[in-house]
Amino acid sequence: MIHVAESALEKINQIRHSENLDLQHFIRVSVTSGGCSGLSYNMEFDDTIQPNDQIFEDKGVKVVTDLKSFLYLFDSTLEFSGGLEGKGFYFSNPNASRTCGCGESFSV
């Protein structure tokens, strides 16, 4: 499961509204090589399900990831922190052994 925190839910709904995205558009998350800690998170709106996608829904938000990325994201929570010191969207990931200061990359 990939969870969605209330803070992320609010921001996702704001973005959906401002960009006129319907509920067919879901959050696609993935993990790629890169970043100062070795692995980076990617997140975007998408409306096409791929054959090996893992699909989750929390608080009315559909979150989709490929199988390989899910191995890194299992039981993670998508969160949002705004303001001057905010990180934007980030993951609280219990599988990460180390994260960078900005929260955009991690290692296991």
Image (cartoon, helix red, strand yellow):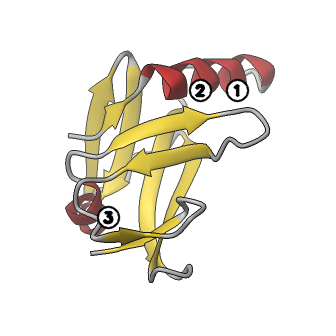
Q: Which mark is residue 12?
A: 2
Say which quadrant the C terminus sits in: bottom left
Q: What amino acid type should be assigned to the residue bearing mark 1? A: Ile
Mark 1 highlights which residue? 15
- The relative height of residue 87 versus residue 101 in the rendered view (above or below) is above
Task: List the residue tagged with mark 3.
Answer: 69
Tell me where residue 7 appears, x and y as whole percent.
52, 23
Residue 50 x %, y %: 37, 54
Q: Residues within 10 Å of mark 1 (few under 14, many from 20)?
A: few
Crowdedness near tag 3: few (<14), some (14–19) or many (≥20) residues, C-alpha within 10 Å: some
Identify which residue, 33 or 45, lies in the foreground.
33
Q: Are marks 2 and 1 in contact (CB under 8 Å)?
A: yes
Image quarter for residue 10? Answer: top right
Residue at image coords 79%, 39% = 84
Tag 1 secondary structure = helix
- 52 or 36: which is nearer to us? 36
Label 2 SS = helix
Residue 80 percent across, percent down from the top left: 56, 35
* Towards the viewer: 106 or 29: 106
Residue sitting at x 42%, y 67% = 31
| Mark nearer the N terminus (2 vs 3) | 2
Q: Identify which residue is drawn at 62% across, 25% down.
A: 11
For residue 95, above or below residue 10: below
- Amino acid at pointer 3: Ser
Dot 2, how many residues are within 10 Å of its Cα: few (below 14), some (14-19), or many (20+)?
some
